[in-house]
Image (cartoon, helix red, strand yellow):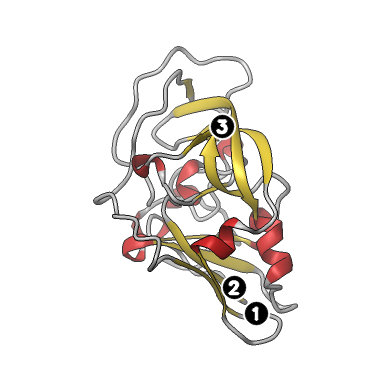
Amino acid sequence: MGQPEEHASGEAAQPGLPPGQRLQRGWPVTHYGPVPRFRPERWEFQVFGATADGLKHSWNHGEFGALPRSTVVADLHCVTRFSMLGAEWSGVPAQVVLDAAPPAPDVTHVMVWAEYGFSSNMRLADFAAEHTIFATHKDGELLTAEHGFPLRLIVPHLYAWKGPKWVRAVEYMTADRRGFWEERGYHNVGDPWKEQRFSYQEQPGEGPDL
């Protein structure tokens, strides 16, 4: 699910942090709504929408776990103003999903869907970025349920709400459409280095009409 609902305590601003962020030593739990119960026999990951072959693709929990894995070291910047630096995320790179279920040539954006119908939109280029990963582990340990187990998207160069917890599907889109937090006043792009926190900051072309 997404976050923004509280400000976490942290240290004074540090060099190298995006504007308005504070260094966080721990990992606060921030999300909207309850923590879902994981039922492995019912769990399924889907890719649908404007796929290259026009079909829906799906993997059960075992099949998704068997996809090629990788580990990236990347920061996490929460719009509630805390940042974790240098975390090690392990899981399935987004590029592996794109290779296994290619998008149609005219796809420009994706919608990432999670439990309870939560959604987050982003540009295809952001989703396909080198460090974007469907994480199952952080710093060598399995994610806890509160932090997104069994699957959490990490998009290090965007605010953390763009990477939902408890991911279940990716929808390929040929036009942009706002996700859950984007419909509720958060910036459609969400670049922490540009401090793109809220929709009123959007410039022409950065998002569909509200």
Residue 124 visible within the image: yes
Q: Amino acid at mark 1?
A: Thr
Q: Secondary structure at mark 1?
A: loop
Q: Secondary structure at mark 2?
A: strand
Horizontally, is 114 left or right of 68 in the view? Answer: left
Q: Which quarter of the rendering shows the C terminus?
A: bottom left
- The residue carrying mark 2 is 172
**Could you say which disc has been placed on residue 140 in the image?**
3
Q: Foreground: 78 or 13?
A: 78
State the separation of the CA atoms marked 3 and 1: 33 Å
Q: Amino acid at mark 3?
A: Gly
Q: Secondary structure at mark 3?
A: loop
**Could you say which disc has been placed on residue 51 in the image?**
1
Q: Quadrant of residue 206?
A: bottom right
Vertical arrangement, residue 150 with respect to residue 47, above or below: above
Q: Earlier in the sequence, mark 3 or mark 2?
A: 3
Tell me whether the residue at label 3 lies in contact with that at label 2, contact meaning CB atoms closer than 8 angstroms. Answer: no
